[in-house]
Image: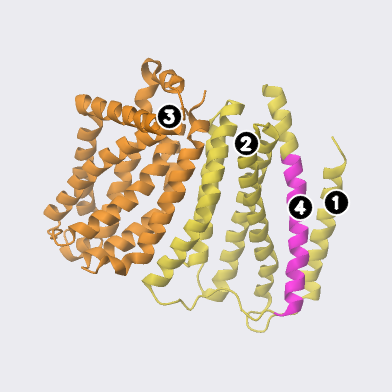
Amino acid sequence: MTAYARRTWIVLWKDLLTERRSKENLNALVLFALLFLFLFQFALGADRERLQAALPGLMWLGFILAGLLGLGRSFLAERDNDCWEGLLQSPGDKSAIYLGKLLANLATMAVVEAVMVTLFGFFYNVSLWATLGPLTVVIALGTLGLAAMGTLFAAMTAQVRARELLFPVLLLPAQVPVLLATVSATESVLLGEPLSAAAPWLKLLAGADVVYLVIGLLTFEFVIEN
Amino acid sequence: MSRTPRVLGWLALAGLATGLGAAFAYAPVEVAQGNVQRIMYLHLPSIGTAYVAFALVFLGSLAYLVTRRLGWDRLAAAAAELGVLFTGLTIVSGSVWGRPTWGTWWTWDARLTSTAVMLLVYVGYLLLRGMVEETDRRARFAGVVGIVAAANIPIVHFSVTWWRTLHQPPTILTPGPSPIDRSLWLVVAVNFVAFLLLFAYFLTRRMEIARLEEEVTG
């Protein structure tokens, strides 16, 4: 088990280090987040009440679009310099690679989401401080579901010609439950209701997270073998 | 190969003729909806067959990943195509039925929404199959997606049901008259058997074509 944790850590550390040195994903994603906010504003007009009413949906659209861009790239670096073969030759259970990649993706998503939430509060003039705790729970549960399936599909589509087309086409319909649950739970949280008010949604999210995670861990080896 | 598919084809034809006859000649005119209700004899067997198809996609996907025998992958692929076909038929027939009875072609009712989402998931599955050329890799990827899609069906179902019920009070558009007469169910059953025979015929034919394709491409 410790060897497994170590292999997971090595993949995670490698990805974080590459990202820290190149910053190519994070910089672009943060800029994207900013652009989303502008686009939503332009698409919905300046009516503040309308924007605030649409906020939970917009927020998750933003997260999911950022996820499509960010998660979809998570295995691309492995295609260069025969890194893919290196991953394949690493000893032991291949699901450790999946777990490492997933954690790295979660870290990236967390940074992007933190920036986006801040920007949402700033531009749409909503005070998110009071609801920050519950909001974090909802975002964490939703992001885990998104990233668990996204990481699995990203490993797959990295090996396919029309990657950037196929990835969203596979991921988006499968993420309908996560979107419905997170938007509803976020709505309830932003209204100042306690977390228990959104309990059914949070349970559904947690259940979905477990299912996606288990499937990811069990099937990843079939996705990366050559 | 064998004569089984041909026999299935004739049986399906006979079944469909019987079902059509039963739907129009035997089944009584429904009091509230009139003749439009006869769409039910197409609608319910279609969705039933679609679920059988998607169950087979799951079975074939799982069995392929465990055994690595391409026959299972061909089963999953053929069943997925037919599942998409029959789900499409369900949605179209439901839409045609909904227009005169509910007054709208489409509504974001829970059952409609989850069926549409299921359709999109399996269309994605077929797209994936179309984009990977190597037989072995395509079978592996499709196997994984086939399992994800099946595991997701109940999650989609619950989320969509709650989404509709938590968001607004139950709509007036609750589909289907609940006290359905037994003679109506009999006609549905006859048509369901006919659809299953047709499905089995298409399935065996499609799997045979896939086998020949693999033989040709190597």
Callout 4: chain: B
Amino acid found under the numbered disc labelled 3: Ala
> What's the colour of chain A in the image?
orange
Q: Residue at x 50, y 52 (%)?
A: B152
Q: CA distance from mark 2 to mark 1?
A: 35 Å
For mark 4, what is the residue?
Answer: B198
What's the distance in space between the residues labelled 2 and 4, CA to CA? 29 Å
Q: Main secondary structure of the magenta part?
A: helix
The residue singled out by tag 3 in the image is A158
Distance, label 1 to label 4, CA atoms, is 9 Å
The residue carrying mark 1 is B10
| Chain hosting mark 1 | B
Q: Quadrant of residue B195?
A: bottom right
Q: Which residues are magenta?
A: B181-206
Task: Give the chain of mark 2.
Answer: B
**Residue that numbered label 2 is attached to:** B66
For the residues labelled 3 and 1, the Cα–Cα distance comes to 45 Å
Q: Earlier in the sequence, mark 1 or mark 4?
A: 1
Marks 2 and 1 share the same chain:
yes
Colour in which chain B is drawn? yellow
**Quadrant occupied by the N terminus of chain A:** top left
> Mark 3 falls on what kind of element?
loop
Labels 2, 4: front one: 2
Q: Earlier in the sequence, mark 2 or mark 1?
A: 1
Residue located at (52% from left, 58% from top): B154
Instruction: Report the front residue among A134 and B13.
Output: A134
Crowd class of label 3 (few under 14; some 14 to 19; many from 20; radius 10 Å): many
**Crowding near the residue tagged with mark 2, few <14, some 14–19, many ≥20 C-alpha atoms within 10 Å:** few
Name the amino acid type tagged 1.
Trp
Q: Label 2: state its secondary structure.
A: helix
